[in-house]
């Protein structure tokens, strides 16, 4: 059941050949997907053979398959975790009922919206990252970028499968539209803000895969609790892919910090200008990038109070992170949760019905998880004997969604006036000059085993290969 059939045009473990209509719909979509990949996928990579992992089954061991692949020939397909015939809905008004194998009419519009919104982020990130291959800091990093890119492509397939299989003609139209929107396009942008931002350099890429792919993890984890079983099974498998993306981000930033710390110690300085002159990224700039990516990413969880969030939960469409591990009643009626608002120029906590605050609940779970990784980055500084520490900003800092949208708050959580914001914002968020400096470091380093000056080599290679392995053959 979990083995993937690679003999078919579209690799799958869902017996696709038994559903001719669906197979035809997906086979019609497939060339459009390839056209999209050629158009806005990794620039100039058509002839590269990349040492990529491909799933051969959805078991954990199924990831053991690594080989050289031309990316446009990657076996994108449809992989669902096995179904559990006993699975019951475990939260919301339908608690205890059997999970749904198809979409109930009354939840159709909401489910479609959830799937389209998730699906839209997948191609968006490929588009955002399409130029990065031209400035890779090493062949190892180039390979990791490409692995992330093909897997985001596969995540798109995962969502398109659900749309085409369960939403009829609307689903086919949505599947087509997913290939038509473009990240950052004025007329036809991607749905969510963070996915229309640029990812112009590798520091942005590592911050993005650390923070924004982690948003993906939390959204997918919440959807994996869904009463709509195909969505649950699809997202469970996607989560195994997402883990690698966050690894790329966490280890990437960690290596940047390690290299900066090394040069700080060699030159015995923490002076940003001297460090920049030595070709490494000063810690203040790293902190500003962190502030930016963190704040833009926590906006993705949506408004702090949302009646949609309540509906999605009560109707069983979207659970909480690790719903099954929580010991409350899984109904949440009458319970409350604290959200922030501004009163008299100060941030204050306010108790609101928990059902309406589920976006905030998920955001707070995300925050806990991302803080843990920042602490691991700080360990690198600690080990190097450097007293500076990185810190995630206050959750009210630089927000654009919900009650905190547009309120000027410092990274340490003080409401500030326009004048202070204007005076300090260049200390808090990346400036055009920071971005230009980081861009100036970006140059292509792709000889096996060589690394750009601003980043340390990784501790080990991919799939137990040496660090100086030939991860990409340029053809
Ligand atoms: Fe993804
Ligand atoms: Fe991802």
Image (cartoon, grey):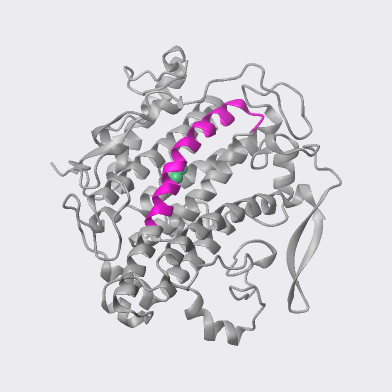
The part of the chain drawn in magenta is 226-252
| Residue 288 horizontal/vertical position (percent) | 46, 71
In the shown orientation, is residue 108 left or right of residue 265? right
Q: Is residue 446 above or below residue 62?
A: below
Identify which residue is drawn at 61% across, 83% down: 418
Q: Principal SS element in the magenta part?
A: helix
Q: Is residue 436 visible?
A: no
Q: Quadrant of the C terminus?
A: top left
Is residue 465 highlighted in magenta? no
* Res. 327 image quadrant: top right
In the shown orientation, is residue 137 left or right of residue 198? left
Identify which residue is drawn at 22% across, 63% down: 443
Between 364 and 409, the one nearer to me in the picture? 364
| Residue 350 horizontal/vertical position (percent) | 80, 63
Farthest-out residue, left: 475
Where's ligand 2: which quadrant? top left
| Residue 398 horizontal/vertical position (percent) | 57, 69
Identify which residue is drawn at 60% across, 69% down: 397
* Res. 66 image quadrant: top left
| Residue 297 horizontal/vertical position (percent) | 53, 57
Q: Is residue 137 above or below residue 312?
A: below
Q: Is residue 59 visible?
A: yes
* Res. 395 image quadrant: bottom right
Is residue 250 highlighted in magenta? yes
Q: How many marks?
A: 0
Between 387 and 17, the one nearer to me in the picture? 387
In the shown orientation, is residue 4 left or right of residue 291? left
Farthest-out residue, right: 334
Q: Is residue 76 above or below residue 135?
A: above
């Amino acid at each position: 059941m979990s083995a993937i059939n690679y003999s078919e045009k579209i690799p799958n473990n869902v017996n696709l050949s038994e559903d001719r209509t669906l197979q035809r719909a997906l086979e019609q979509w497939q060339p459009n997907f390839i056209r999209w990949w050629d158009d806005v996928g990794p620039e100039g990579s058509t002839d590269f053979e990349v040492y990529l992992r491909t799933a051969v089954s959805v078991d954990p061991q199924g990831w053991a398959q690594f080989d050289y692949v031309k990316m446009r020939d990657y076996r994108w397909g449809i992989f669902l975790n096995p179904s559990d015939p006993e699975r019951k809905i475990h939260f919301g008004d339908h608690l205890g009922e059997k999970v749904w194998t198809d979409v109930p009419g009354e939840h159709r519009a909401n489910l479609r919206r959830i799937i389209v919104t998730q699906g839209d982020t997948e191609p968006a990130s490929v588009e955002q990252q399409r130029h990065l291959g031209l400035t890779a800091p090493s062949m190892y990093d180039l390979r990791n970028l490409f692995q992330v890119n093909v897997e985001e492509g596969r995540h798109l397939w995962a969502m398109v499968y659900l749309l085409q299989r369960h939403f009829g003609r609307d689903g086919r139209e949505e599947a087509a539209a997913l290939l038509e929107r473009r990240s950052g396009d004025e007329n036809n942008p991607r749905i969510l803000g963070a996915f229309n931002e640029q990812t112009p350099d590798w520091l942005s890429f590592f911050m993005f895969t650390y923070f924004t792919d982690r948003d993906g993890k939390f959204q997918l984890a919440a959807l994996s609790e869904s009463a709509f079983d195909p969505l649950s099974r699809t997202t469970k498998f996607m989560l195994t892919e997402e883990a690698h993306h966050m690894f790329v981000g966490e280890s990437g930033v960690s290596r940047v910090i390690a290299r900066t710390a090394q040069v700080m110690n060699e030159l015995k300085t923490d002076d940003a200008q001297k460090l920049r002159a030595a070709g490494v990224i000063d810690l203040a700039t790293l902190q500003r990038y962190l502030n930016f990516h963190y704040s833009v990413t926590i906006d993705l969880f949506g408004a702090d109070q949302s009646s949609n969030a309540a509906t999605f939960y009560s109707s069983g469409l979207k659970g909480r992170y690790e719903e099954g591990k929580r010991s409350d009643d899984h109904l949440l009626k009458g319970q409350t949760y604290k959200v922030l608002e501004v009163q008299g120029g100060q941030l204050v906590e306010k108790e609101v019905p928990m059902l309406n605050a589920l976006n905030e609940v998920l955001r707070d779970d995300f925050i806990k998880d991302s803080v843990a990784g920042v602490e691991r980055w700080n360990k690198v500084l600690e080990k190097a004997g450097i007293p500076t520490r990185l810190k995630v900003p206050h959750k009210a800092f630089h927000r654009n969604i919900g009650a905190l949208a547009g309120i000027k708050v410092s990274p340490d959580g003080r409401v500030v006036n326009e004048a202070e914001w204007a005076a300090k914002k260049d200390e808090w968020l990346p400036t055009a000059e920071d971005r230009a400096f980081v861009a100036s470091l970006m140059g292509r380093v792709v000889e096996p085993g060589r690394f750009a000056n601003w980043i340390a080599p990784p501790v080990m290679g991919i799939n137990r290969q040496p660090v100086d392995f030939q991860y990409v053959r340029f053809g």
